[in-house]
Every structure is written in structure tokens, then in C-alpha cells.
Image (cartoon, helix red, strand yellow):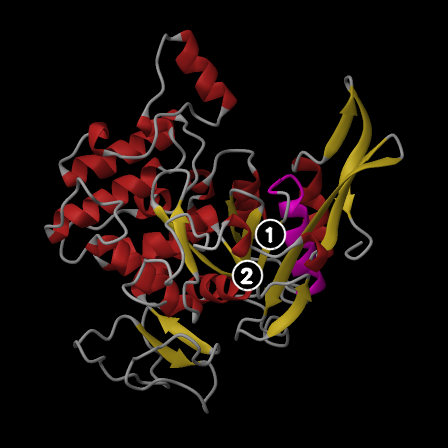
């Protein structure tokens, strides 16, 4: 990134387009994408979803590419794990977030009463009220929660907006650090600067453009490869440095946030890490380890009961996060059912931390979970049986009236 962290490169405006015009900047084109899934109705392919995807090994090697995963994309809510990690790092000696509050900091929640109660608890820690949130007023995305509110005569609220947990956690970090809360979404704000730096640190890639997300927060463009690399580092993070691979304290005396080599021949003994360095470096961060563990233990909080992210977390042990405009990240964990692990774990290949990042180019998410899980199966990181058992719960059926007449299925490149 040129200039201050979190600001667009020279020649781009705040929307991420260049001064030359809106056609001069953007993500990959349809000609560079591949067909990922189709919608079939009564034996007729009615719609086709094209996009790009990448699968990385636990040490960051590229296992699979589809389309152009090196092109920049705006990850939308798939950046929330990085935003949450930056917040957790800035809590210092304040009251730590508990496990469920930690998940809400990275959630795109359904707005149920349970979700709202957690958001309010974070605001209470900060000594703030819902009026301090700067996300839009909204209805819950949960239809049952929305219907209950409408019947009760309630109105839209910032609390129901799916990003309210992230905003509440950001405000809490600002209060603890004495930073202004009125401008916490400004790209020049200290917290937003830390978030941008965290994205670059974990992804190993410079931010190529910055924009404004639907919730009003800054959002940054990176490639799918970088997104997968960063998510994999978070989900495979170590809470402490391993005894067999000691790490010296970093320059500021903080040894908690460093990288250690995944192999004996690589590493960063001074704790430093710069974009573009070895992708096999493993993050040592109690915050990242706590974030992953919290999500796995509270899948309902990151999305909602019966919804795609929650199902993948609860049923498959997969760290799963959807982002608007067709973006998806998935990363396997020790709880994920990998081939061979249940039979002879000591002999099975290491698949924990295998990570998928994908973007469906038309922005529709209805096939994203299917595609992401399939790519993890093809990489040997999940069993086919475990995924097949989950697919009927992913709302992939196409209806004609009340009768099933088709399905959302994989394109030939993935079938």
C-alpha cells in the first residue's frame, strides 16, 4: 500500500476506482472466470454462476486455482476475522471479550434476540449505547426474528444490522485506547489503521484499493490468494510459540504476535513479518487462536441456526465465513473430518488449515458453500460422506410451486 495504511493507492478515489474512470479498476472479468455452478430447472440449465477460487495447503502452497484468484477482490465480510483480530490485539489490559462476544466481533449475525443481547453486552463493557453504533438501521436477516419485531410494533435498529457486533467491538477497543469513538470508521482513525496493517501482515499482500463497506466501515481489496493465506494463518494460529521453535521477542518487547517457521529451514526469529515473505510462516497469536476456538465452539453466533456458516462450523468443524457479493472463505480445523484421520490420525496427511477462498462473479452466494466444500473434498481436507450428509440442508433445491423441479449443482469443471 502506498501512503498511510488503509488509504487507496495514488490515483484511486475512496470508492476504489481510478481517476481515469469507473472502468479502469475492478475485479476479474467474466472472460477470466470459470463456471462454478449452475441452476437447473426441469432439466434446463436456467442460470450459470462463474467465478474464481483458490485452495491453499496448511503451509500456504497453492493446491488448486480456478479462474483468476490473483486478481483483486473486495472480500466484504470475509475481512471480519482480520478486523476482529485487530480489535482483540488492541484490548490491552481491559476486560477481555468472552468467547461469544469474540464471535460477534467477526459475525454477520442473523439479528436474533440472542445475537442482540451479546451486542448489547459489548456496548455495556464500553460504557456506550446503541446510539454510538454507526452501522445502518436494519431489520434482522432472520425472518422469524423480523416477524416477531414487526408484530410487536418495533422499528429498525442498528442492533439488528448483521455487522453490529463488529461495530460494538471496534467501539470497545477505541474506549480502552482513548481513541475517539465519533470517527471510528474514518480510514485515518488509529483503529482502522491497525486493521489495514493487520490485513497486510496476515495476507502477505499490499492492499490495492479501499472502499466503504455496506455497514459503513472501510473495506480493502486484496486477491483471493492473499485472502486464503490470511484466513489460513488465523485458523491455524498457535497460542504460544512451540518449545522446539523458540522465538525472540519482537522489537517492541511483545512476543505474542509473531510468526514461526512451519519447517525447520524457515522462520522469522526477530518476530518480524512483511508482505511477500514466506507463506509457510505460522502465526503465533493467542488472540487468533482464541478467535478460531470461539467460532468453533459457538457456530450459532457467527451466522444463525440452520444457516450455511453455522452448519459448516457445527457439523463439519470448518471455519466458514460468507461475504457479500459472492465471496466465501473456508478453512479446515482439527475438528474437520479429513480422509484417514478417523482411522489412523498419526499416519494421515496434515490437512488442518487447508483453506479455500472464492468469489462468484455475479455476487450471488447461493452456490458458494457447495463450491467451497467441494474444493475442500477435492483437496483431501474433508470426507465426501460428511459433505454429502450436509448438502440437503443447504437450500439447494429449485421449486416449481411446492414441488422440487431442479437443483443448484456443480458445473462440469467441479462435478
Q: Nearer the viewer, residue 355 or 12?
A: 12
Residue 83, position as x, y percentages in the image: 34, 53
The residue at the point 40 percent across, 43 percent down is: 213
Residue assigned mark 1: 359
Classify mark 1: helix, strand or loop. strand
Q: Residues within 10 Å of mark 2 (few under 14, many from 20)?
A: many
The answer to which image quadrant residue 224 occupies is bottom right
Q: Nearer the viewer, residue 51 or 395?
A: 51
* The C terminus, quarter of image: bottom right
* Above/below status of 321 relative to 148: below
Q: Is residue 150 left or right of residue 408?
A: left
Q: Give the residue furthest to the front.
A: 20
Query: Badge 1: few (under 14), some or many (20 or more) residues near its Cα, within 10 Å?
Result: many
Q: How many marks?
A: 2
Can residue 237 be seen here? Answer: no
> Which residue is at a point 61% across and 72% down the rendered structure image?
62
105, above or below 232, in the image: above
Query: Residue 221: image x %, image y %?
Result: 45, 57
Q: Which residue is mark 2?
A: 224
Taking the spot 44% from the left edge, 42% from the top edge, the residue there is: 302
Q: Quadrant of the N terminus?
A: bottom left
Q: Is residue 191 left or right of residue 152?
A: left
In the image, residue 56 lies at what x, y percent? 58, 68
Label ID, residue 140: none
Report the magenta residues as a range. 363-380
Q: Residue at x 24, y 75 (%)?
A: 255
Residue 346 seen from this side = yes
Out of 76 and 94, give the one closest to the viewer.
76
Q: Main secondary structure of the magenta part?
A: helix
Residue 374 within the magenta-colored segment of the rendering: yes
Amino acid at each position: 500500500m502506498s501512503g498511510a495504511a488503509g488509504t487507496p493507492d495514488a490515483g484511486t478515489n475512496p470508492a476504489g476506482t481510478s481517476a481515469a474512470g469507473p472502468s479502469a479498476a475492478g475485479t476479474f472479468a467474466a472472460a477470466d472466470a470459470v463456471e462454478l455452478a449452475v441452476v437447473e430447472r426441469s432439466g434446463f440449465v436456467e442460470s450459470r454462476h462463474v467465478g474464481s477460487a483458490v485452495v491453499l495447503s496448511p503451509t500456504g502452497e497453492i493446491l488448486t486455482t480456478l479462474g483468476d484468484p490473483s486478481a483483486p477482490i473486495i472480500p466484504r465480510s470475509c475481512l471480519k476475522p482480520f478486523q476482529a483480530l485487530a480489535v482483540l490485539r488492541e484490548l490491552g489490559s481491559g476486560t477481555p471479550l468472552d468467547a461469544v462476544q469474540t464471535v460477534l466481533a467477526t459475525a454477520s449475525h442473523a439479528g436474533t434476540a440472542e445475537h442482540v443481547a451479546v451486542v448489547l453486552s459489548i456496548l455495556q463493557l464500553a460504557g456506550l449505547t446503541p446510539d454510538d453504533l454507526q452501522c445502518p438501521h436494519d431489520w434482522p436477516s432472520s425472518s422469524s426474528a423480523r416477524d416477531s419485531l414487526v408484530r410487536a410494533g418495533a422499528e429498525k435498529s442498528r442492533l439488528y444490522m448483521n455487522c453490529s457486533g463488529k461495530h460494538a467491538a471496534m467501539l470497545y477497543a477505541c474506549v480502552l485506547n482513548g481513541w475517539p469513538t465519533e470517527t471510528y470508521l474514518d480510514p485515518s482513525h488509529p483503529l482502522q489503521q491497525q486493521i489495514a496493517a493487520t490485513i497486510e501482515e496476515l495476507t502477505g499482500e499490499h492492499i490495492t484499493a479501499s472502499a466503504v463497506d455496506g455497514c459503513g466501515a472501510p473495506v480493502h481489496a486484496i486477491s483471493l490468494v492473499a485472502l486464503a493465506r490470511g484466513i489460513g494463518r488465523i485458523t491455524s494460529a498457535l497460542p504460544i510459540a512451540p518449545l522446539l521453535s523458540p522465538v525472540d521477542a519482537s522489537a517492541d518487547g511483545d512476543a505474542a504476535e509473531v510468526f514461526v517457521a512451519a519447517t525447520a529451514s524457515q522462520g522469522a526469529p526477530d518476530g518480524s513479518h512483511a508482505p511477500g515473505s514466506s507463506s509457510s510462516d505460522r502465526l503465533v497469536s493467542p488472540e487468533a487462536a482464541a478467535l478460531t476456538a470461539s467460532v468453533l465452539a459457538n457456530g450459532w453466533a457467527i451466522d444463525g441456526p440452520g444457516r450455511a456458516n453455522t452448519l459448516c462450523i457445527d457439523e463439519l468443524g470448518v471455519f466458514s465465513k460468507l461475504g457479500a457479493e459472492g465471496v466465501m472463505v473456508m478453512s479446515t480445523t482439527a475438528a474437520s473430518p479429513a480422509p484417514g484421520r478417523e482411522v489412523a490420525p498419526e499416519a494421515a496427511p496434515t490437512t488442518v488449515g487447508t483453506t479455500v477462498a472464492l468469489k462468484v462473479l455475479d455476487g450471488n452466494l447461493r452456490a458458494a458453500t457447495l463450491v467451497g466444500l467441494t474444493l475442500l473434498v477435492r483437496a483431501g481436507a474433508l470426507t465426501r460422506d460428511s459433505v454429502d450428509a450436509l448438502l440437503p440442508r443447504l437450500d439447494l433445491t429449485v421449486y416449481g410451486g411446492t414441488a422440487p423441479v431442479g437443483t443448484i449443482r456443480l458445473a462440469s469443471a467441479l462435478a
